[in-house]
Image: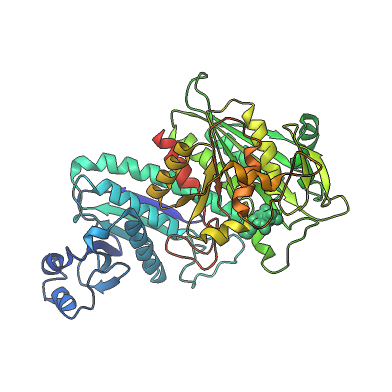
Amino acid sequence: MAMKVTYSCSATMQQDVACRVIMVSAQQWPDLALSLSPWSDDGMLSALMADGEFSAKSEQTLMLHAAGNPPRLMLVGLGDEDKITKRVYRAAASLAVQQLRQRQLSSWVFDLHLFCADTVVDVADCLFDGALLELYRFERYKSADPTAACSNAADIELCCAFGAIAVNVLPVLQQRLNQRQIVSTGVCLARDLVNEPSNVKTPIYLAQTAWQLAQDYQLTCTLLGPAELERQGFGALLAVAKGSICEPRLIVLEYKGAGDDSAPIALVGKGVTFDSGGISLKPGEGMDQMKMDMAGGAAVLATMSIIAQLQLPINVIGVVPAVENMPSGSATRPGDIVTSLSGQTIEILNTDAEGRLILADALAWVGKKSPAQIIDLATLTGACILALGHHTSAVLGNDDSLAQALCQAGEATGERLWQLPLFAEYAEQIKSQVADMKNIGGRPAGTITAAAFLQKFVGQTPWAHLDIAGTAWEEKGKPGQPSGATGFGVRLLVEYLQSR
Ligand code: BES
Ligand code: MN
Ligand code: ZN
């Protein structure tokens, strides 16, 4: 984020800002319209209400000017009180920020006086979340255009204050907002990495990023290059990397927030910096989007940096197998058989099913660290988009309570997960005539057979796999999610780890 966001909490309404923003439910609106001086004084608000121009329906906004201070009022509808959820608050804040930006207003105050003391912190947290995620733009490669309404190249400093709140709540609110800014900055880091084009974002680039994060936040970083990967027997990972002139890296970040006797939670993220398909080349149309095939890895790196800043009392190990999948004279061919790190052999029938190959070795490697749980995130299958579209990610695994806990974390952060079954029968589809398994399972249940493949490398450790193929990238842009990388999974992982 090129933009700087400063924020403050205050028990009185901040005066020196461009706009006061009030989120109001349909039930609260009639009272507010009568009592919000100076705007209600000449009956303007009740007139607005009477002719139904603004009725506080959700996604409704209204900007008013007055001779008051602040000189503008923005009303944002929350709709029916009974239907208000965290999603509604986030979306309302995103919508408000969209409007403020279009008008090039760079300071505002969220007026919280309509919320009671026991919910106001959660509400403000959601509002800040929705606002910060909406503010993100990827503009590193755009020359500055000061007239562009949505540009942050113009270096505006956004000030966002939270006013009208009980004094005793202030320190709690301040702390929550501090945490929220750390998390949002992490989400935006993940977005930056995913949006970065693949001519810049090589496996080594990801490794250097991880190294820098380790310096900044006191993490331990270990990087394995081709020679070491060869020596240890990462046959599946190396088979994917072979076709590219970019060297692969296994990136490992370790965070220690608990004693040595506490088994770490392992996070594993797919880090294919570009997925051309390899010799099983993808069609040209839309291939550019495959720069996002390291979104799982980006989510893991970002999450590691966040939990280090939040100082969570747990041990976590993050692993990102980083490779580029390219066709060339040295590339893996369909039909090649390789020996994975686990010792199991794999018949590679389609070089475009590369994610599971690199994850197989990463999962086997981290399994040797005796983790308490393994959670992997990957833009793994197009089939997942067919099943769940772009609003929900799939979760699968060998431990239903872990899957359910992740679903809950996702519900809390607005990153929805839906569990797919992983019955033993699905593994039939990846049986090979000539090796221990093959890397494709045919058309039926492509997301499940991919997970069944991964399962062969996790053993008995409680494990969950998130297929984020449909949610890592947003084509058009929606509230809180500008077009491009979404940063999906970061907030969910942080929420899950915090809840432990
Ligand atoms: N990275 C892709 C999956 C993908 C597709 C992610 C679209 C995001 C958007 C993955 O490596 C892939 O190519 N999967 C193949 C597997 C198939 C060959 C068994 C697929 O889904 O077509
Ligand atoms: Mn692929
Ligand atoms: Zn891929």
Q: Residue furthest bottom?
A: 51
Looking at the picture, how far across and down is residue 27, in whole percent? 17, 64
Where is 260 relative to 157, above or below?
above
Looking at the picture, how far across and down is residue 274, in whole percent? 70, 54
As rendered, which of 270 and 349 lies closer to the eye? Answer: 349
Looking at the picture, how far across and down is residue 132, in whole percent? 42, 55
Q: Residue furthest top?
A: 261
Looking at the picture, how far across and down is residue 102, in whole percent? 41, 71
How many dots with numbers?
0
Choose top left, top right, bottom left or bottom right for residue 279.
bottom right
Residue at figure coordinates x 39%, y 57% from the top left? 131
Q: Is residue 474 visible?
A: yes
Residue at figure coordinates x 85%, y 55% from the top left? 328
Q: The C terminus is located in which quarter?
A: top left
Residue at figure coordinates x 33%, y 62% from the top left? 92
Along the horizontal axis of the image, is 8 left or right of 32?
A: right
State the scheme by which the image is colored.
rainbow
As rendered, which of 296 and 67 lies closer to the eye? Answer: 296
Residue at figure coordinates x 28%, y 52% from the top left? 162
As rendered, which of 297 and 188 lies closer to the eye? Answer: 297
Q: Is residue 139 visible?
A: no
Along the horizontal axis of the image, is 218 left or right of 353?
A: left
Q: Quadrant of ligand 1?
A: bottom right
